[in-house]
Structure formats: structure tokens, C-alpha cells
Amino acid sequence: MKFNNTIVGIFLCCCISALQASEVQIAAAANLRYVLPALVVAFKQQTGHHINVSYAASGTLTTQIQHGAPYEVFFSADPSYILRISDEELSEGEFINFARAQIVLFSSTQSSLSLDADFMGLKLALDRGELNKVAIANPIHAPYGQAAQNLLEQAGIWQKIQSHLLIAENASQALQFALSSQVDAGFVPYSYMLQPQISSQGRYIKLNETLPQQAVLIRGASPVARQFLAFIQTEPAKAIFRMQGFIVEDKAS
């Protein structure tokens, strides 16, 4: 059976266009909301490939992957979630440590709470009965909530502050809550504070806690997904992470 060359050419062009139009699906912790867009743009300029990113708490994304969500790369703000994916044989290849994230205590311009790394302002407000609400991401599935809980436990006020906590789904929602006039403060990613539209709405104190950031390929990931994960480890990508408030080791470290 003979085929018209024109028809074959059209068919091949359509197939190639379909492949080029496909998007790589990435699952990313909410704290990467302001850094991944720049990385996606840089990757597209370099390779022509497009990356589609879904943001949520790391624990939420883990559950989605366990239930078959079609992600190809998972960026987690807590290594334990990468380990869960690996233990269930849902990932492939080695995970990468691409950065360490920082956390801050943020208060909007409407709050009079005194901010300090030792939480003396929080303790004083608690003792005086003057504390309204403090926003944190849900410690059950959100690494920033877990970090906030650890810090409050170390300060000896975790139990005492329970009735004042406003639990958010993830770090992004914790910031939304913290901007409310009814909320005195919130534990949020430092990278958010480097966004002028956010920093102009309040003040913050950087806290002595960092969160290891890891990424891994999900089983069945495409070659483009592998290429993106490799790109994340390049020096230009590391420079973008640093600009957005993440701690990244130098190549020689």
C-alpha cells in the first residue's frame, strides 16, 4: 500500500507538534512558589520545553503521588516525604539535595506584636492575654508547620499557644492568614519576604531553622523531566535559588 508523501509529511508534523506541545508535570512544595517560575522560564529559554508546576504542602503532594497523580518530578520541603515515595517504589534514580530553605516570623503592618528570634514578644503577649492569632501551616503535612512547631516547642510555648494558632493548609495560605488584621503573626518562608509586594505589607525576623529541600524523579518520568532535574543542579539555577533566599552550597563544598 502506497502513501502520498504529502499525507505522510502532514502526519509526521502533527506527531512532532503533539510531542512538542506536551508539558512536564512537576509537584512542588508551596515555599517554591516564587523561585520555580524563574527556573521554568530559564529552562524553557535554554531547551524550548515547558514545565507545568502544581504547588501544595509536601505531605499533600505525597498523598497525590501515592494515589497516581501524573507528576514526573517531586520537589519536597522535607526529606521524609521523598523517603515515603522511595519506600513505595514510586520514584526512580537518586534524590538530589538542591537547597536549604529559611523560615521567618512575619507580622503585617496592622500588627503591633514585637518580633524577635527568641519569641519574647510572643511570650509577653501570651502572658498579658493580648495575643490574637498566629498562623502556621498544618504540621501534619506541611514542613513549614512542622518547623514552626519545633521552634515553638524549643521556646517552651507550644502547648500554651495552641488556642491562638490558626492552621493553614500550606505555607502560602499561612501568609494569607498572616496578612489579616485579626492575625498577629505567621510562620512563612523567607523567600516570600524577598517579594516587594509582600515585604511592603509588614515586617519579619529570620529564625534559626532551615529546611532541607530535595527533589526526585517519579517512576516513568520523561527525558525532559530528567533534563529539568539536571538543570536544577546547574550553577545558573543555583544562582536563581540564592537570589530568592535559599541556601545553596557552592560546587566546591
Image: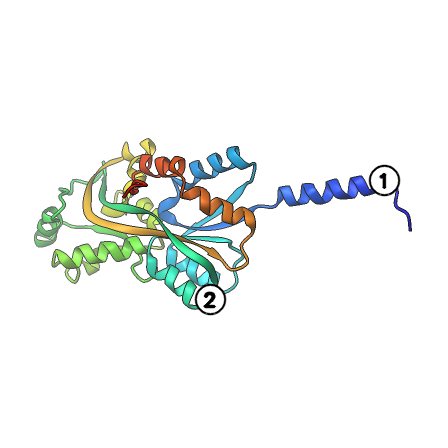
Q: Amino acid at mark 1?
A: Asn
Measured as percent of width and height from the top left, residue 221 is found at 53, 54
Q: Which mark is residue 5?
A: 1
At label 2, counting other C-alpha atoms closer than 10 Å, the crowd grade (few under 14, some 14-19, many 20 or more) is few
Front-lying residue, 124 or 91:
91
Q: Is residue 93 above or below residue 237?
A: below
Say whether disc 1 or disc 2 marks the residue closer to the N-terminus: 1
Front-lying residue, 253 or 209:
253
Point out the image quarter for the C terminus.
top left
Measured as percent of width and height from the top left, residue 243 is found at 32, 34
Q: Residue at x 56, y 36 (%)?
A: 48
Measured as percent of width and height from the top left, residue 8 is found at 82, 43
Q: Residue furthest right?
A: 1
Q: Disc 2 designates what residue? A: 89
Q: Residue at x 29, y 47 (%)?
A: 100
Q: Residue furthest bottom?
A: 88
**In screen coordinates, is 137 left or right of 95?**
left
Kindly report the distance in space between the C-alpha atoms of the residues bearing marks 1 and 2. 45 Å
Front-lying residue, 154 or 1:
1
Q: Residue at x 65, y 45 (%)?
A: 19
Q: Is residue 29 above or below residue 206?
A: below
Q: Secondary structure at mark 2?
A: loop
Q: Residue furthest front?
A: 252
**In screen coordinates, is 20 left or right of 232?**
right
Measured as percent of width and height from the top left, residue 246 is found at 30, 41
Q: Amino acid at mark 2?
A: Glu
Q: Is residue 203 above or below residue 29?
A: above
State the colouring used for the structure image: rainbow
Toward which corner of the image does residue 248 lie, by quadrant?
top left
Q: Secondary structure at mark 1?
A: helix
Toward which corner of the image does residue 80 lie, by quadrant?
bottom left
Front-lying residue, 176 or 95:
95
